[in-house]
Amino acid sequence: MHDYSATTTAIINQAVDLEQTLPIKNEACGSKFFFHPHPTPKVCLFFHGFTAGPYQFEPLGKALFELGYNVMIPLQPGHGVAGNFDRDNPPPLPLECEVYQKYAVSWLEIAQKLGDRIIVGGLSSGGTLAAWLALEYYQEIEKTLLFSPYLSSKNAVVDFVVEVLPIYYEWLNKDNPGNFGYNGFQIPALRIFLDMGQEILDRVKNNPSSPIFIVTSESDAVVDRSDLKKLFESVIKKQPKSWYFCFDKLFDIPHTMMTELEGNNYVGLLNTLVKAYLESDITWNEVLTIGNKILQGKNFDAAVKYLDLTGKVFPDLSVLLSVMDKKAIVDLNA
């Protein structure tokens, strides 16, 4: 207990010391830690999105903390720094993927000091980084959560611009009250994630990864969902306990899906789906089979019992099945 307490105190103090020297732009951009006073079986490590900050994972972090997890949401390199940044003075975002990769590995090593069952996750470019970790350290990661990981853009023209032009870009939603990060960035700073995403898609065809849960949305105007499905199809061949869920358009959930302030009015639902995945121990095919039995007239509990999955299924799975595309259940169980 003394070692655990000393470790968690050191983690917090080191982050605070670093962020005071930057200094950080605002409190929302500071690293977030949700540590229990005692060791926990599972530890979550989350990576926020590009030009954003740890505030994005605060709602999910709190939900998982209440479920008994320790949670770490560290500030990414070059992010959240105070300053008057514009096209003549762009924010100090890294221009080499190795900077992010070393950062991710260092935090994975820190997480391993707190428990032996590690969950990593990320939104957008943070999801790209989490996917890279899931490939590089698949034996050391229990599960991976990818929230609309940035593997490629929905618009091929955008991909071309990101790949070729060294321009400064300002976010269209920079005045959104939920945006506590940078208003803009140099395109080359984003390009490294596009390159990393394509490398991930190539590598995952022949290399193992940890089990993953991909969450995306039909209203996401940023990422190419066909690439997310390709990623899922590659991963599930080796890790059948990987899941995939896409929010229907009626929920109108944007790319920035982790907080209500950034546009998701169903954050509670998102957090419930995550808990269903992390607390269940079943394959995607078993998820679909439960859904199929429900469509045939059984209630959720009866379907789980009929399939002899009692004890392996977290009750919140019923919520995922209730909002899931029923056609997908029928088609994949045909």
Image (cartoon, rainbow, N blue to C red):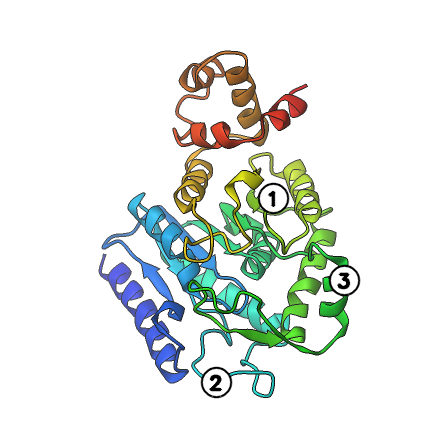
Up the image or down, 199 lies above or below 242; here it is below
Kindly state the secondary structure of the residue where label 2 is placed.
Answer: loop
**Residue 234 position within the rendered picture, expressed as x and y whole percent measured from the top left:** 69, 42
Q: Quadrant of residue 125?
A: bottom right
Which tag, 2 or 3, sits closer to the chain's start?
2
- Looking at the image, residue 84 lies above or below residue 210: below
Q: CA distance from mark 1 to mark 3?
A: 20 Å
Q: Amino acid at mark 1?
A: Glu
State the residue at coordinates (62%, 53%): 221
Q: Secondary structure at mark 1?
A: loop
**Image location of residue 195, percent across then percent down:** 70, 64
Residue 60 lies, in percent from the top left, at 39, 50
Q: Nearer the viewer, residue 264 or 34?
A: 264
> Does residue 276 lie above or below 219 as drawn?
above
Question: Tag 3, which secondary structure?
Answer: helix
| Residue occupied by mark 1 | 218
Residue under the image location 50 percent in, 11 percent down: 297
Q: Which mark is residue 196?
A: none
Mark 2 Cα shell of 10 Å, populated few (<14), some (14-19), many (≥20)? few
Asked whether 17 or 157 is in front, the reply is 157
- The residue that mark 3 highlights is 157
C-alpha separation, residue under disc 2 versus residue under disc 1: 35 Å
- Report the amino acid beneath label 2: Asn
